[in-house]
Amino acid sequence: MLDHVGTEEADIDARVRFLTQVLGHRLLRWGTHVVTGRRIAMLADPAGMKLELMEVDAVRGELDHVAYRVPDVDAAHAALLASGCTEIRAPFDLLAARARSSLLAEPTGSRLQLVAYAPDSPDLT
């Protein structure tokens, strides 16, 4: 199940303001990117589709990742490794999201995030 897409944002505050004030998105939470230590913002549009904004110094112009919700991150991660994906980040706990996650590269190079949420996660829509 598609969960969210992640984008790079050089001016994350302006982007959050535009999405919430103009397009009607709801800010679910602010967080810290586990690799860069920079800010992230998780938002949901009026229909519930989520968008993760990741603060960067310079936008590369690429979609950063597509995230899929799975029931068991560890099992799905292992299955994708066996299918030819490359591990970028082993399964880990995302405390702010109350979730478990991992990050892999598909054979094509596209980045794929796996995520499983606790029932009380602020990221559930």
Image (tube, rainbow, N blue to C red):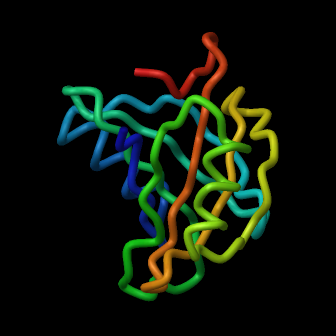
Apparent side of residue 79 relative to residue 41 in the rendered image (left or right): right
Q: Is residue 12 above or below residue 45?
A: below
Give the image location of residue 106, x and y in percent: 50, 75
Residue 94: percent from left, percent from top:
75, 40
3 left or right of 84?
left
Could you tell me residue 121's position as x and y percent? 62, 20
The residue under the point 68% across, 46% down is 101
| Furthest-front residue in this view | 82
Q: Nearer the viewer, residue 123 or 76?
A: 76
Q: Quadrant of residue 54?
A: bottom right
Which one is nearer the viewer's eye here, 119 or 97? 119
Measured along the vertical axis of the image, is residue 10 above or below residue 12? below
Query: Which residue does the image show at 28% across and 27% down from the upper left?
Result: 48
For this view, does 101 lie left or right of residue 122?
Answer: right
Q: Is residue 67 above or below residue 69?
A: below
Looking at the image, residue 122 lies above or below residue 9: above
Residue 82 picture quarter: bottom right
The residue positioned 81% from the left and 47% from the top of the image is: 92
Query: What is the residue that sits farthest to the top in this orientation?
Result: 120
